[in-house]
Amino acid sequence: MKTIAEGMSDSWVIEKFTDPREAHAFLLKPDVRIVVIDDEAIEESMRVWLLDQVRKHALHALVAYIAAIHSPETERRARAYSVQYYTSKPMDRERTLRVLHSFERAAH
């Protein structure tokens, strides 16, 4: 989360949820522009549900997906849900920050 916070200016509100179900109400807000999913603490069965919720309720949000462990299946699934940026841990910090900065510019 620290890298994500570093990637965004102070004008953004960052909400962190450890339970994907808690994020549902947040996704219903009309002004969600960027969503970053770090799947490390998310149960496998909830990952698809969360991606589905993002696409249903934050349709125009830019989405970054950070996989705890890379697998072709996880990447395919994320991209099938129109995730604009996919990476896995250990992630390239500088590249991820550049992507978040570009998301921020595009979302304004």
Image (tube, grey):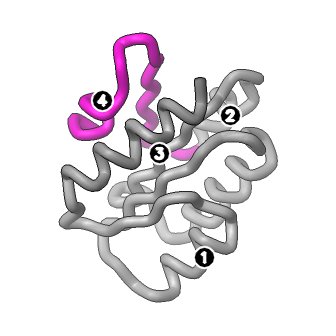
Real-space Cα separation, disc 4 to disc 3, in angstroms:
11 Å
* Proximity of marks 4 and 3: CB atoms separated by less than 8 Å: no
Q: Which mark is residue 5?
A: 4
| Picture quarter with the N terminus | top left
Q: Is the C-beta separation of discs 1 and 2 under 8 Å? A: no
Q: Residues within 10 Å of mark 2 (few under 14, many from 20)?
A: many
The residue singled out by tag 2 in the image is: 27
Main secondary-structure element of the magenta-colored stretch? loop
Distance in Å between CA atoms under marks 1 and 3 = 15 Å
As drawn, the residue found furthest toward the right would be 56
Looking at the rendered structure, the number of numbered marks drawn on it comes to 4
Quadrant of the rendered structure where residue 7 is? top left
Q: Look at the image and give the residue range highlighted in magenta.
A: 1-20
From the top left corner, tell me how far across and down residue 55 is, in percent. 74, 52
Amino acid type of disc 2?
Answer: Leu
Q: Earlier in the sequence, mark 2 or mark 4?
A: 4
The residue lying at 31 percent from left, 51 percent from top is 96
Depth check, mark 2 against mark 4: the one in front is 4
Question: For the residues marked 3 and 2, what is the alpha-carbon distance in whole angstroms?
Answer: 12 Å
Percent position of residue 42, x then y: 44, 58
